[in-house]
């Protein structure tokens, strides 16, 4: 999970940051901003991204890309990036990014929206002294006074792209090198369905953004077993499933760039499933209200994250 490409400062002219709830806005108005404050009582600015996971429902595999340059270099991830002013909507933005990074083409109506990540860093922008202790559970958040670090919350809309609905095959581009992984070997419901040949490696969570091991495992274990022909898109996830994931990062030295990165080291996360609601119902106002409610609770200062159902 995490965004592709460099993240400009929120006050940069090229930034497309959206204000938080309660004021709903249209995609063309993503220039609106709000102030991130130390006391977190002012709604945080949010920056829109998309993330696409190509999935082969006949083989039980997913295609991930190895990031060759820029933000997230050295990690495997889905395909995606920033919402641009020229994008008519989020699904169209996701299709554009998928095509640019893999050459796969798919229509927006063939994407399956499955979740929204809200990634928030409370880390200072530069290397703190001393560094946080190695064990995140022992971190004293009072050592992190720089919550006004000018970083927006990264609001990443996640989609599945069924490969049988795509045109073309994934190829290496300037940004991403594709590789196919099995989602069967690490999901209890599917472990007995592994084909003898060909053999695909399991998903490399240790080489991905750390929050992926939370939400992606929950998603993949709900996919149907390999079947041909694949199910219709509305029946891929039955019963219906989608998620919201608020993640707090405290920063660390990146193992790939060996530099301080405020988006490293997941501190705590809160993964909430939506078992009876369509993500299409979650407009800008509702998304903003949800994340600001979580921020006002400061849940990460308690005993830890939780897995629950929205509204419980």
Image (cartoon, rainbow, N blue to C red):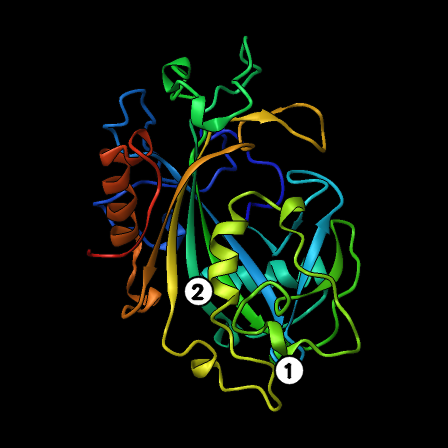
Res. 210 visible in picture: yes
Judge whether 92 appears above or below 193 on screen. Answer: above
- Please tell me whether mark 1 sits on a helix, a strand or a loop: loop
Q: Is residue 133 left or right of residue 170?
A: left
* Pointer 2 or 1: first along the chain: 1
Foreground of the two, 215 or 296: 215
Residue occupied by mark 2: 114
From mark 2 to mark 1, how far is it between C-alphas? Answer: 19 Å
**Which residue is farthest bottom?**
229
Query: Residue 24 location in percent, x, y?
Result: 26, 51
Residue at the location (65% across, 71% down)? 105
Query: Residue 261 location in percent, x, y?
Result: 59, 27
Q: Which mark is residue 58?
A: 1
User: Marks 2 and 1: CB-CB under 8 Å?
Assistant: no
Residue at the location (24% across, 44% down)? 21
Residue at the location (65% across, 40% down)? 72
Foreground of the two, 9 or 175: 175
Instruction: Using a 10 Å C-alpha cutoff, classify the residue at mark 1 as few (fewer than 14 neighbours), some (14 to 19) or many (20 or more).
Output: some
Instruction: Using a 10 Å C-alpha cutoff, classify the residue at mark 2 as few (fewer than 14 neighbours), some (14 to 19) or many (20 or more).
Output: many
Query: Residue 48 location in percent, x, y?
Result: 45, 47
Q: Is residue 312 left or right of residue 63?
A: left
Query: Residue 198 location in percent, x, y?
Result: 79, 75
Quarter of the rendering occupied by the C terminus: bottom left
Figure quadrant of residue 281: bottom left
**Which residue is farthest top?**
129
Judge whether 246 appears above or below 27 on screen. Answer: above
Figure quadrant of residue 162: bottom right
User: How many callouts does the rendering have?
Assistant: 2
Residue at the location (31% across, 34% down)? 303
């Amino acid at each position: 999970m995490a965004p592709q490409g460099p993240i400009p400062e929120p006050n940069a002219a090229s930034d497309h940051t959206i204000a938080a709830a309660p004021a709903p806005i249209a995609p063309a108005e993503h220039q609106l901003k709000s102030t991130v404050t130390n006391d977190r009582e002012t709604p945080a600015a949010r920056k829109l991204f998309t993330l696409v996971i190509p999935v082969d429902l006949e083989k039980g595999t997913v295609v991930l890309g190895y990031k060759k340059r820029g933000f997230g270099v050295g990690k495997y991830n889905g395909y995606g990036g920033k919402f641009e002013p020229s994008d008519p909507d989020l699904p169209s933005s996701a299709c554009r990014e998928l095509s640019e990074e893999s050459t796969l083409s798919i229509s927006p109506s063939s994407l399956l929206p499955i979740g929204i990540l809200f990634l928030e860093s409370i880390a200072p922008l530069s290397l703190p002294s001393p560094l946080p202790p190695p064990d995140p559970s022992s971190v004293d958040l009072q050592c992190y006074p720089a919550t006004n670090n000018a970083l927006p919350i990264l609001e990443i809309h996640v989609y599945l792209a069924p490969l049988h609905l795509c045109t073309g095959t994934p190829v290496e581009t300037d940004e991403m090198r594709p590789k196919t992984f099995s989602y069967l070997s690490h999901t209890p419901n599917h472990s007995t369905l592994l084909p003898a040949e060909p053999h695909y490696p399991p998903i490399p969570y240790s080489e991905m953004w750390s929050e992926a091991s939370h939400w992606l495992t929950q998603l993949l274990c709900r996919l149907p077993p390999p079947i041909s022909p694949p199910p219709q898109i509305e029946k891929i996830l039955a019963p219906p499933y989608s998620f919201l994931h608020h993640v707090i990062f405290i920063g660390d030295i990146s193992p790939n760039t060996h530099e301080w990165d405020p988006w490293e080291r997941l501190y705590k996360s809160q993964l909430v499933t939506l078992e009876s609601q369509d993500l299409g119902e979650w407009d800008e106002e509702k998304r903003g209200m949800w994340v600001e409610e979580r921020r006002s609770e400061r849940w990460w200062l308690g005993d830890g994250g939780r897995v629950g159902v929205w509204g419980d």
